[in-house]
Every structure is written in C-alpha cells, then in structure tokens.
Amino acid sequence: MKTYPTEDIRNVVLLGHSGAGKTTVAEALMARAGALQRVGRVDDGTSVLDTEPEEVARHLSISLALAPFEWTTPGGRAFKVNLIDCPGYPDFVGEVHAALSIADLAVFVLSAVEGVEVQTELLWREARARGLARLVFVNKDDKERADFHAVLDQLRAVFGNGFAPLQLPLGEAGALHGVADVLSEDAFDYEPGGAHHLAAMPDDVAGEEHRLHEEVVEEIVAGDDDQLERYLSGDEPSVAELACTLAHQMAAGTEFPVLVGSAASGVGIDRLADFICELVPSPADLPTPVVAGTETIAVPAAPMGEPLVHVFKTIADPFVGQLSVFKVLSGTIRSDDRLVNARTGVEERLHGLFVLRGKEQTAVGVAVAGDIAAVAKLAGTRTGDTLAPKGMPVRVREHATVVPNYGVAIVPVTQSDDDRLNGALHRLQAEDPVLCVDRVEETGQTVLRGVGDAHIAVTLERLARKFSVRVDTADVRVPYRETIVGHGAAEGKVKKQSGGHGQFAIANLRVAPLPRGAGFEFSDAIVGGAIPRNYVPAVQKGVEDTMISGGVHGFPVVDVRVECYDGKFHSVDSSEMAFKTAASLGLKQALADAGPAVLEPISMVRVTVPSGFQGDVMADVTSRRGRVHGTDVAEHGEQEIIAFVPTSELARYAVELRSMTAGRGRFTAQHDHYDVLPTHLVDKVKKSLLKS
C-alpha cells in the first residue's frame, strides 16, 4: 500500500447494534476494493476481521479490527480508507470509544429488518457528543421483511431531523437488484460480484425518486445562502456543488446522508465507498485538541509539523509481544524515530512500522499525519498514551470513560498460575483499559471488574489462551463489619501453671459505641498500678488485633471505644503475651455483653434510564432494600435516580439493569457509608460467607 497525502486519507469507524452486519460490510468494502481475495462469513468463523477464538466461538466482534483499503472514485481520485470495524455488543463498548477517539466519520450500519436498535441509539449520542460526522448505511435490504422506508421514518422519530436519503432501493427483500441515486437521479443495477451499470429508472420508483430529489436538494441548499438564492431563481446547483455543501453540513453535524444496500450481495457497497471518499472531511480539515499543561490547543494534521502520535489500541500478542496501534496526529513518522511518552517521560524507539489488516501485518516506511499504523514492543506505552518530541509534553484530551461495574473474584488454580497472574493481568489491562483489577485487603480477594458478564468471560478465556494462566472465579465478598449498640464490660483472664514460669494476667475492659465512622478509641484508665505501665501497650495490642480479626460474628470491629480500667498481675508469671491474650478474651466477652450488630456497606447509586422505565427501576431499587434519595432530569429526556442501596444487592446489577431496561439503563455506584444489617439477615450472610 502506497503512502497517501493527508487530504486523501479517510478514517472511518463502523458502528451499530450487534448483528447489523458491520463486519460483513467491512469485508465487502475490502473485497470490492481488491484488498481481499475472498469474503468470509462471521457465522462460519471464516471472517478475516473476527479472527480471535473468542470471536469465532461467539459469532460476534469483540475487539476493534482495522480494515484499510485503497479506493478510486468515479472522478479518478485515489484515496486510502482506514476502516475500523467495532463490536456492537454492549460489553465491549470500550473498543468503540478507542476507535471514536481517532475517527473522522462514523458510519452507522443498521439492519433494514430490525431498524434502529438500542446500541445504535447509545452510540449515536456518543458520536454526537464528540462532534463526529455521521452517515447511515441501511444494510440487509435483501432480507425478508426488509423495509428501508420504515427505517428512515424510525431514524427521524428517534434522532430528529437532518437525515437526507441519498438513495432508494430498486426492489426490496428478495427482489433487491440496485439503488437509485437521489442527487444524480441515476439508477444503478447490480451484477453478481458487486459491479453495477446504469439502467433506466423503474416506473414504480421514478415518481418517488423525483419527489425525494426535490426535497433533498431543498434541504441541502437551505444551509448555503448562495446556493439557496440560485435555487430560488431557478438555477439548481450541480451534483458536485450539492455534494460539496452536504460535506460541509456533515462536518457541522447538521445533515446525515442515508444510503441503502446489502453487504452480502454487494448492492450499494461501491457507492458507499464513493460517498465515504467524496463527502467525508479529511484529517487535514480536523485539528486534534490536545492538552498542554492547563491549556487546550488544536493541533493541525500537517505532515511537516512536529511528530505527534496517539496510541488508541494495544494488542497483547504472546509471540510478537505488545503491538501499539496509533494515529499520526501531526508530522511524518518513520521507522526508528524516537519519541517521548508524555505520561511517563520515557523515550520510545519506533523500531519498525507496519499496517494492520485484520491479523495481517504489512511493513511500511513512513506514516504521514492523519494516517494509522502500528509498531511492536513499546513496553512502556499503553492505550491512550501520546508520543511527542522531547520537551513537548502534550496529551490527547480524554472523553467519557467506560465504568466497569461488574466484578468477580479470581483465584489462581495452581502456584504456577499465581506466579504469572499479575504480569498477565497487567498485559490484559494494557490491551483493554476498561478492565480494572482490585486487590481488596479486607476480604483478601483479587477482584476483576469489567462491563458485563460476557466481558469478564472473554477476559478469562484470553488469560488462559494467551498467557496460560488458569483461574477459578468466586463471588465478590462484601466487606461486612461489626459494632455494638450498647455498653458492656467483662474481665479477661489468663491463668496457667505448668511448671516453671506460668502465665497470669487479668484485664478488666469496658466498651461503648462511637458515632458511625469514628473508628476506634482505646482509653487507659488504670489507677494504683493494677496493671504495670509496661503491660498496657500489650493490652491495647490485644484489643486492636481482636478487632481486626473479628468480633462476635467474625467481622472486623469498628466504631467502639474500649477502656481498660482495672486488672491484676503477678510479679513472676505475668508477661506481655499474657496481657495480650487476656485483653482479647475480655474484649470478645464485653462485645457480646454490649449487643453486637453487623454493619453492611451502602453504595450511592446513580441510575440513568429513559423515563418509561423509571417506575420499574425505582420499584426494583426498593426490592433490593434500597432507599430512593431523589430523581433528576438527565440528558435526552432521561431520568436520573439517586438511591442508597446495600452493596451486597448490586453484585449482578450491571446485567440485571440492562435486562430490565432493554439495554438502555446505566449506572454508577460508589461506597457511601455503613449501616446496620437487619437482624434476620445476619445468619444468612454468615452462611453465605462460609460457603464461599
């Protein structure tokens, strides 16, 4: 693949709901461009882009895949299109965010049968928030029950105005054989293999096509004063002029072309490539905002500028090592260039550049501003890092991050697995920054968190396949604690004689509750030398160790004041160990006398859902022993529900909320405070912990 100038490069991300056919569209585009000899099938596991065993087994995309190809438009201009195929399953939305960070256009692939689905809605909002140009391709129009007009109506109903249908299908469902171009008013009939030829406009389409032509032209010229004036005077702009105006409106986010076709049969695929090249802004038109200190500046994609690279994807390859996929934001990058990681300050050498197409690697000499390339073995660089010249510490401005709300505890199967676990998890996190690993000291568990159960399942499969690390999973233990509700007192006594020096110590303790969150207080109220001063620290140590190891119910004790007010000692048989043991025994008795209570962690949860689901979600929160604190109006007409919910009730909430709201609900949860666990649940909690 030759080197293209920045203005002839197009960076395009394919988005949409799982099953809409994004991967098939990507492979059809590459095949039509001559970049592929064959088109694989996702269902058969022969796709060129979905090659990971986890993808083949599930028949869906899990990671973003690069599909670059070269394309020459009817006008004879050649382009390089860096196509990025993204997963549509919600658990892998982190891959979509990575692709969106470097894309210049989002092509939304919709099924002509299912229409606008939930993931399409959510990703449309994300693309709009990033100010990304958008185009819609209605795929699968050759399937039974396909209805292009219904999908167009649904787009307008869900997202509002601005959708400009630039094509109409010729035939539909099993009879699809071509497309009618609304701007040029030409009909394109397709042959097997995806080639097309001009044909007469069918009578059953001609009337609608002409009416639509007038509507679309009026909508386009309405955004350009000069063209509007000419149009009103009877001079209709040429197709090229209309396309130029439409391109500016796409870049401004006010117009969204709608195309139609079928990736499986090839109908409309070449025209999709033409529109991508002709209507989409190039990287040269889209400076990248970067942060320099406290200031945000726009860096133009100038090949002669300072070299600046953004790593948007990392691939952990057990044989080659780490592969870093990057976009050149500015300058021209060559093999063996040296740049500094703005996050770590470490200099990295780009040993050799190559282009990825699926798993295929093709060496290249240079990568110009706006282009995408990859490099191996940048050990200190991870996803999201920026590489810049020395003395130029800038970083790409971050957008919203994906919150990993679903977790499982992982336990290595063998000692060998345990030895390799940390390194393997670190490399997986470099590949997938959404993953979060928590090592919880209070429960002694290592917790792996992701977006959902499928995300975690795939991660564990990759852990075993790529790094030969096997783990078992367990439920995440909730860090319960204990306190007391009243006052109590007890005598802790150790008296042991077995020849020689014995063990003797008596410590009299009183306990009292402290306000929630106060922690622990120890008071030395000894008078008259009942316990010598040198043994008091041992008493305190015995109390503290017992509070950590667990009280009456076996949980760490908090929010308690302990007073040692009396005791006895023996001049020969007393020791620090004896007083430490006596304090431990006395504390447990005093806690039992004071009325122990189990405390459970309470999380503050913010749930955002469409208003139609608000009642169901609030009822569900109540069923989880939660307390709704309030509601607020969020963006897009949604409702935000703020509630306090026991953390133990949120173990599978990420999965259950998605099911309850048809995939439209999302939430964040953070620890807020501890509260008393209802008495009737104490035994149940203790039994569940014993089982785990």
Image (cartoon, rainbow, N blue to C red):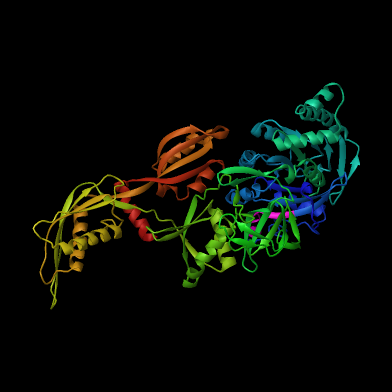
In depth, the one of 525 and 261 nearer the eye is 525
Quadrant of residue 574 in the image? bottom left
At x 56% / y 41%, what residue is drawn?
664
Where does the N terminus fall, quadrant-wise? bottom right
Give the residues drawn in magenta, as a range: 55-67
At x 42% / y 47%, what residue is drawn?
649
Question: With 408 as the anchor, is 324 left or right in this view?
Answer: right
| Direction left: furthest residue | 528
Where does the C terminus fall, quadrant-wise? bottom left
Residue 679: x %, y % from top left: 29, 47
Question: With 402 as the anchor, is 192 left or right in this view?
Answer: right
At x 55% / y 44%, what residue is drawn?
294
Residue 641: x %, y % from top left: 47, 36
Please indicate, yes or no, whether residue 510 appears anywhere in the rendered image: yes
In depth, the one of 398 and 116 nearer the eye is 398
Quadrant of residue 349 in the image? bottom right
Residue 675: x %, y % from top left: 33, 45
- Residue 290 in the image: above or below residue 574: above
